[in-house]
Image: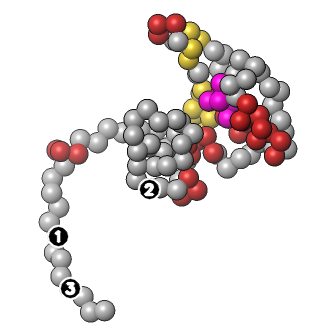
């Protein structure tokens, strides 16, 4: 059962989702969070950036050294859709994320800001 570690966590939850043997970790975790008001853990996790590309999604180490509890996620998972076949026969996990906002920032095109730096008294 691929989602075994998540079903172990369900013993600590008030509302327990029924186990599905074909369900992945990435599907079971938001399902557990949707059934229990669990401080938006999956929503906080998707805001983290792993230090190296390709690390597991449940790795709690962030590139910017941000702690999970310091993140205030404004988006939320609203549903878990049915499995669909992705590109080249891969299994995709469609999670429906609500109120997700994003912006592309052209960092090289931003002008420099002039500032003055001087010593202050201790």
Indicate the quadrant containing the C terminus: top left, top right, bottom left or bottom right: bottom left
Do tag 3 and tag 1 residues touch (Cβ < 8 Å)? no
- Say which element carries label 2: loop
Label 1 residue SS = loop
Residue in the foreground of this view, choosing between 55 and 106 = 55
Mark 2 or mark 3: which comes first in sequence? Answer: 2
| 25 within the magenta span | yes
Mark 3 neighbour class, 10 Å CA radius: few under 14, some 14 to 19, many 20 or more: few
User: Label 2: few (<14), some or many (≥20) within 10 Å?
Assistant: few
Residue 59, compared with residue 97, is above or below; it is below
Residue 91 seen in this snapshot: yes
- Residue on which the image places disc 3: 119
Q: Quadrant of the N terminus?
A: top right
User: Which residue corresponds to the image point at 49% horizontal and 44% vertical from the top-left?
Assistant: 47
Say whether residue 42 is left or right of residue 50.
right
Q: Is residue 92 magenta?
A: no
Q: Is residue 72 visible?
A: no
Report the front residue among 69 and 9: 9
Task: Using the rendered view, name the quadrant where residue 76 is placed.
Answer: top right
* Mark 1 neighbour class, 10 Å CA radius: few under 14, some 14 to 19, many 20 or more: few
User: Range of the magenta residues?
Assistant: 24-29
- Element type at mark 3: loop
Residue 22 vs residue 86, the one in the foreground:
22
Q: Which disc is residue 115 wearing?
A: 1
Q: Residue at x 71, y 47 (%)?
A: 38
- Magenta stretch: helix, strand or loop mostly: helix
The mark nearer the N terminus, 1 or 2, is 2
Query: Which residue bears the numbered disc 2?
Result: 65
Horizontally, residue 95 falls left or right of residue 13, namely: left
């Amino acid at each position: 059962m691929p989602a075994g570690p998540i079903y172990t966590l369900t013993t600590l939850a008030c509302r327990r989702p029924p186990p599905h043997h074909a369900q992945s970790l990435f599907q079971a975790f938001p399902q557990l969070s949707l059934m229990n008001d669990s401080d938006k853990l999956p929503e906080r996790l998707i805001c983290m950036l792993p230090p190296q590309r390709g690390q597991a999604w449940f790795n709690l180490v962030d590139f910017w050294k941000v702690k999970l509890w310091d993140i205030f996620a404004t988006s939320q998972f609203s549903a878990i859709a049915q499995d669909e076949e992705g590109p080249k026969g891969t299994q995709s996990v469609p999670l429906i994320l609500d109120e997700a906002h994003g912006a592309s920032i052209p960092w090289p095109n931003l002008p420099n800001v002039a500032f003055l730096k001087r010593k202050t008294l201790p």
